[in-house]
Every structure is written in C-alpha cells, then in structure tokens.
Image: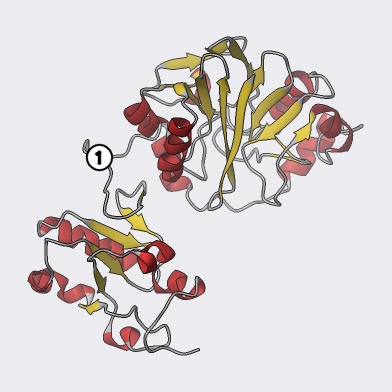
C-alpha cells in the first residue's frame, strides 16, 4: 500500500506531496514549503513515517523550501537536480536516477525549461508523476528566468511526460484555480499550450509573448533555495515555543494567527507599535493592548515584562517585525508577531475596541 497525501500552501499556491511505503513506513516529501514545516512534520509523526528524503522539483522562485528544516528536525536527506546550481544537498540527481523509500521508488526524469534544473519524479509503476512547474494542469510554468527556455520545455513535456501512460496521474507544484490533479492522457489532448497538434514554434511564440511580472518573493526565495532553504540565522536548537501554536517564518520570526491569539488563555502582552492616530483610528485596536509606538520602543521596553510572552502588532505586520528585533536585543525571548497585523485581525472578525464598522 502506498501512503499518499497532497498538501497545500495558500500563500504561494504550492502543492507538497508526501509519499510512503505502507509496509516499511519509509517516505519522501516533494516540494515542502518553509512556513509549513511544522504542519508537515506533525503529519509525518502522526502517520508514523520515517522520512528518508526531501525532493525539490527545482529551485523555486515563489517560496522557500523546507528541505533544510526537515533535515534538521527529522534527519531526512536533501536531493535536487545537479543542474540546479544549488549547494548543500546530500545528493545531486540526474536523469535516470532512482530514489528509493522502502520497497517503492521514484524515477528521476530531467525536464528543463522552466529552469535549467527542473525534474519530474515518476512512481515505479507509472501510476503517478510529479511534474513541478514544467507541466501544470492545462498549462505550463513560465520560461523567462533562471535559465528557462521554451524550446527545452517543449521537448521535456513531449519526450518525458507525454510518453507516460494515458492513465498516469500528474501532480503539479502549483495550481491557482483549485485544481488538484490531471493525467498524461488529458494533458496530451487538452493542454492549450502543448497538447494536440501544437508544434514547437507555436509554443515558443506563445511563451515569448507572455510578459509576466516576476514572482513577488523571487529575491528572497531563489537565494534561499540555492542553499536548500538554510536560513541565514538558523532557528534555535531548542524545542519550538510551547506557549501557543506558532509558525516560524524564513525571516526568522515566530508568528501567531489572529484566531489563535484571540482564543489564547494564558498571560500574554499584546504590544501595539502603531502611531497614536492609528491606535485610535478606523482599524481600532485589540482589547487590552499595550500602546508603545515603534519609535519609542527601545527607550520604553522596560514597561514590558520578560516573564510573559509578547505579541507585537501593527497595521500589516512589518513594523511589528521590527519591534520583535528591538525586543530581542533588549533580552526578551518569548516573542511573536501577529500575522497580517490589524488588517488580518479585522478581516478574520476578531474583537476590537474603537475603530469603525
């Protein structure tokens, strides 16, 4: 029996795939997302899986991989394409390689085009394949940066993916419409960019004229992924914070979601670092919040207790992240940023004082 789970990161619209051999419980994870590491590790633990490998389909430009964090936490080895240009992996993969987990294995197929180092992973019985950003559901990845090349993508899809059996299920790294899976037969027939009678010249002309904006996180994601997701400042070796369910961001900051904070029952100091006109303005403020503008925090940090956690709040989460850095320097340890700030707090329908309807 194959254990299979398809996981999703809403912020980057990224699919992560967990596969394991049901007999031995050895498994692999494909395209894990940095911010979702704790979620994925929890599922792996609950299912009793021994994670052998983290596999990235390519050096992503829209999110940071969780490969390094999963190696640190679970001991899984990191693998990606030798042509990726990355450093720090435990294994560099080439076309024709296999990655074993228990009695199962994945075949590695080089499918460059989106980037130079794109791979597709094909399950041993060819019942499913993981195509990364090479082939999407009724679409393809872009080909205009990181060594991308439309002619290479055309060959990759036609020679490495469309040669799979019609019934082979194809799982992409992303989808932006809520679609989850397709098949080789479907895409060979219905893909508007590469299916049917579309020839290489048609495809190259189409891709050349897309003129897409670069991904919003490319300046963060690509350098990080070239190091397998290892942060510039590693998260601490100690256990994760236990005072509330938090997520660790690649910026090195623990975040708490609005609903989690509102329902939290323990002692916590909510620090609002906006300006006075914002604190009393249309967004209102969180009941019981301590108001210290960011510009005054260094001088007034003594007004906060180091005995209880501090959650920093601003309009959208940027200034409060700066507040976290200031409080760290002042010796505070149990710190978290309110994800999305007061904008998210209001959007989620959490309780406010003041403000407008």
Residue 189 in which image quadrant? top right
Q: Is residue 65 visible?
A: no
From the viewer's side, name the closer residue of 90 and 16.
Answer: 16
- Identify the residue at image location x=67%, y=45%: 175
Compared to 278, does 301 lie above or below?
Answer: above
- Could you tell me how many numbered marks the image carries? 1
Label 1 packing within 10 angstroms: few (<14), some (14-19), many (20+): few
On the question of residue 19 being in view, the answer is: yes
Residue 160 drawn at (x, y percent): 73, 19
- Identify the residue position indicated by label 1 in the image: 239
Note whether 40 is above or below 108 in the view shown.
below
Q: Is residue 286 left or right of residue 335?
A: right
13 and 149: which one is in front? 13
Residue 282: quarter of image: bottom left
Residue farthest to the right, as pictured? 197
Q: In the image, what residue occupies the spot 45% across and 23% down?
A: 51
Nearer the observer, 288 or 151 = 288
Q: Quadrant of residue 291?
A: bottom left
Residue 233 on image: x %, y %:
25, 41
Q: Position of residue 346 (x, y in %)?
A: 46, 76
Image quadrant containing the N terminus: top right
Looking at the image, residue 269 sits to the left or right of residue 110; the answer is left
Residue 90 rendering spot, x and y as whole percentages: 40, 17
Which residue is drawn at the image coordinates 30% and 52% (left, top)?
253
SS for dot 1: loop
51 displayed left or right of 174: left
On the rendered structure, is 11 left or right of 243? right
**Which residue corresponds to the image point at 66% horizontal and 29% vertical from the top-left?**
131
From this view, report whether residue 69 is shown above or below residue 349: above
Q: How is the image coloured?
A: secondary structure
């Amino acid at each position: 029996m194959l254990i299979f789970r398809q996981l999703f990161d809403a912020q980057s619209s990224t699919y992560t795939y967990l596969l394991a051999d049901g007999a031995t419980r050895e498994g692999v994870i494909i395209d894990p997302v940095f911010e979702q590491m704790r979620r994925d590790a929890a599922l792996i633990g609950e299912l009793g899986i021994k994670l052998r490998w983290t596999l990235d389909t390519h050096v992503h430009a829209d999110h940071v991989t969780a490969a390094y964090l999963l190696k640190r936490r679970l001991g899984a080895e990191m693998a990606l394409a030798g042509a990726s240009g990355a450093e720090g992996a435990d294994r560099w993969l080439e076309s024709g390689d296999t990655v074993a987990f228990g009695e199962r294995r994945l075949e590695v197929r080089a499918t460059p085009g989106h980037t130079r180092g794109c791979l597709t992973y094909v399950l041993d019985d060819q019942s499913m394949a993981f195509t990364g950003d090479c082939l999407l559901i009724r679409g393809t990845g872009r080909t205009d940066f990181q060594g991308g090349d439309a002619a290479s993508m055309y060959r990759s899809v036609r020679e490495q993916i469309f040669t799979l059996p019609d019934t082979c299920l194809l799982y992409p790294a992303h989808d932006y419409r809520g679609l989850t899976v397709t098949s080789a037969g479907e895409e060979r027939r219905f893909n508007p960019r590469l299916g049917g009678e579309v020839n290489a010249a048609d495809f190259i002309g189409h891709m050349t004229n897309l003129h897409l904006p670069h991904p919003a996180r490319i300046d963060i994601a690509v350098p990080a992924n070239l190091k397998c997701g290892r942060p510039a400042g590693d998260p601490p070796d100690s256990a994760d914070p236990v005072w509330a369910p938090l997520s660790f961001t690649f910026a090195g900051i623990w975040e708490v979601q609005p609903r989690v904070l509102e329902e939290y029952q323990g002692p916590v100091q909510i620090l609002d670092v906006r300006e006075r006109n914002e604190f009393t303005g249309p967004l209102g403020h969180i009941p019981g919040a301590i108001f210290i503008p960011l510009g005054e925090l260094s001088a007034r940090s003594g007004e906060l207790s180091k005995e209880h956690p501090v959650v920093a709040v601003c309009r959208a989460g940027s200034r409060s992240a700066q507040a976290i850095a200031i409080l760290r320097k002042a010796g505070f340890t149990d710190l978290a940023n309110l994800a999305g700030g007061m904008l998210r707090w209001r959007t989620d329908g959490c309780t406010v004082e003041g403000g407008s309807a």
